[in-house]
Image (cartoon, rainbow, N blue to C red):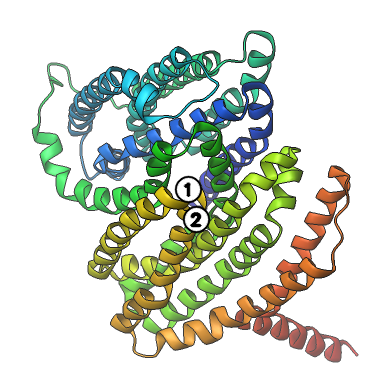
């Protein structure tokens, strides 16, 4: 039992390490991309990221299904032959979708480069070549997802994390000397990424087949639809939630890729990358708490369940609200420190302000969704997600058509605010009558008030240095202070500190 716990803990740490490394290195290297490729070409990188995310909607929940079935094999629920037949069936689906999807994107390369994207300085042929390469990269990464799910199910997370770190290093770091010494065009950039994607796929396929159990001699593993049919219900339930989330977080990127010139789209992409940092820093807290919430819900221990739910909300709010406040209040300073380019900082700052506030709301508002998942009641979650997308999309199109990226930012902020104010109360009332009032008053209001007051004070009293290195130290110090002041507003944290102090005083009294 102890060895099992150690193994699980090691896997969790390895997973977090690779996620943190990939995210941080991806953000850190962006200014170098812009330096070598140019701002307009970085807009193509944003278009690629959006296209790759939208392509994942075709997954239909099959990747997590592969991970689940592999884990079930490890637990003895299915045999080796069933696992291999499922993998073979899913390989047929994944390779088929990859070929068709890649071919469709490549066939559309002329239309996308000439009619959809609005390049002003990049040659049309360069944009077209980049899209052709994107199509192949997306197909390879799509296929590799299947084998990533299998390796995950076998619980080889340490190896997988090492692979992820190596791939991230190649994608984000090693590409820089390639751009510096070989060529710095979009074709060079995406050509290098294609080589990395091919290497990653080979590694994952090799490891998956090394881990697969042997089958009895004479047994065949031919392609058949039957293994997929057996797990389709689970896959579709996962697919709807995942697809809705992708739509919510990427519909603005799709709309703006059509409306904005590539340079302005690059500014928008930069702002969104930074704003998403609010979700990134709170995600580990959520991931750590979800299994415990699910366990308490299955035991029907409502008192402990809602106590942990509210503590989790405060834990996320403590980091998400101050982070969103800092990015919103000091958007131009943060962008200048990050990129070293005053023009980019001025252009992207208003977008960063709006998206940071909207993403901060989204981070806190995600906890009611976890409540519904843990309770096994997803009706309001499905309805709310559908309403969110159906209202956000036309709002985005109208606002973006008239006001560009700023219009998209206001749409994103307004939609998240409406969801927070009007839909979350409905969700809370479904499970507990007085939950929402307590959640707002005791779990969020204090943290929000302390964070806003401290951020506003810093905004008016701090004088920023003209030296980037010193300004970065200022930013770190200001963020730390606002985080600490925001934490004072947490009733849960205050109780913990008070309890620890009382314990120390009692211990000191006994020693005397």
* Quadrant of image for the C terminus: bottom right
Residue 82 at x, y percent in the picture: 17, 33
Most foreground residue, 329 or 490: 329
Q: Secondary structure at mark 1?
A: loop
Left or right: 175, with 440 as reference point: right
Residue 273 versus residue 425 in the image, above or below: above
Position of residue 226 in the picture relative to residue 477 (left or right)? left
The numbered dot on residue 404 is 1
Q: Secondary structure at mark 2?
A: helix
182 to 83, vertically: above or below: above
Q: Residues within 10 Å of mark 2 (few under 14, many from 20)?
A: many
Residue 153 location, quadrant: top left
| Near-viewer residue (78 or 282) | 282
Instruction: Kindly report the distance in space between the C-alpha atoms of the residues bearing marks 2 and 1.
Output: 9 Å
Q: Nearer the viewer, residue 9 or 283?
A: 283
Which is nearer the eye, 391 or 227?
391
Residue 345 versus residue 486 in the image, above or below: above
**Residue most toward the right?**
512
User: How many labels, in total?
Assistant: 2
Q: Nearer the viewer, mark 2 or mark 1?
A: 1
Pick out the residue farthest to the top.
Answer: 182
Instruction: Determine which of the numbered discs, if any, sits on residue 409 in the image.
Output: 2
Q: Is residue 13 left or right of residue 176?
A: left
């Amino acid at each position: 039992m102890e060895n099992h716990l150690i193994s699980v803990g090691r896997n969790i740490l390895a997973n977090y390490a690779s996620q943190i490394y990939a995210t941080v290195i991806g953000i850190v290297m962006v200014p170098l991309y812009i330096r070598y490729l140019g701002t307009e070409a970085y807009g193509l990188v944003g278009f690629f990221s959006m296209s790759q995310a939208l392509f994942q909607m075709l997954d239909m929940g099959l990747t997590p299904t592969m991970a689940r079935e592999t884990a079930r094999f490890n637990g003895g629920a299915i045999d080796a032959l069933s696992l291999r037949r499922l993998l073979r069936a899913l390989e047929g689906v994944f390779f088929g979708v990859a070929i068709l999807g890649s071919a469709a994107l490549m066939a559309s390369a002329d239309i996308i480069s000439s009619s959809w994207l609005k390049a002003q300085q990049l040659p049309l042929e360069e944009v077209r070549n980049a899209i052709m390469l994107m199509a192949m990269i997306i197909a390879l990464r799509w296929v590799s997802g299947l084998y990533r799910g299998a390796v995950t199910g076998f619980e080889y997370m340490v190896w997988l994390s090492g692979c992820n770190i190596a791939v991230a290093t190649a994608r984000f770091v090693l590409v820089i000397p390639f751009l510096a010494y070989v060529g710095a065009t979009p074709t060079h950039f995406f050509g290098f990424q294609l080589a990395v994607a091919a290497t990653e796929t080979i590694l994952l396929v090799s490891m998956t087949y090394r881990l697969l159990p042997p089958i009895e001699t004479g047994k065949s593993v031919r392609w058949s639809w039957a293994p997929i049919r057996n797990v389709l219900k689970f896959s579709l339930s996962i697919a709807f939630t995942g697809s809705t989330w992708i739509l919510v977080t990427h519909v603005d990127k799709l709309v703006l890729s059509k409306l904005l010139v590539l340079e302005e789209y690059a500014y928008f992409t930069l702002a969104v990358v930074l704003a998403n940092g609010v979700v990134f820093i709170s995600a580990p807290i959520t991931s750590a708490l979800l299994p415990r919430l699910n366990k308490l819900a299955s035991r029907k221990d409502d008192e402990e369940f809602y106590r942990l739910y509210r503590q989790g909300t405060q834990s996320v709010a403590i980091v998400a609200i101050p982070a969103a406040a800092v990015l919103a209040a000091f958007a131009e300073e943060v962008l200048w420190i990050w990129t070293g380019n005053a023009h980019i900082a001025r252009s992207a700052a208003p977008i960063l302000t709006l998206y940071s506030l909207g993403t901060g709301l989204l981070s806190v508002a995600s906890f009611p969704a976890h409540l519904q998942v843990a309770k096994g009641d997803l009706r309001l979650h499905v309805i709310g997600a559908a309403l969110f997308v159906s209202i956000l999309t036309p709002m985005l199109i109208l606002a973006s058509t008239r006001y560009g990226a700023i219009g998209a930012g206001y749409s994103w902020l307004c939609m998240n605010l409406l969801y927070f104010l009007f839909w979350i109360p409905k969700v809370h009332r479904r499970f507990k009558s007085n939950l929402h009032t307590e959640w707002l008053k005791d779990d969020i209001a204090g943290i929000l008030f302390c964070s806003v007051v401290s951020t506003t004070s810093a905004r008016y009293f701090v004088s920023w240095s003209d030296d980037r290195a010193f300004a970065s130290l200022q930013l770190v110090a200001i963020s730390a202070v606002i985080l600490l002041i925001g934490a004072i507003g947490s009733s849960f944290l205050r109780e913990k500190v008070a309890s620890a102090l009382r314990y120390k005083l009692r211990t000191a009294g006994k020693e005397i």
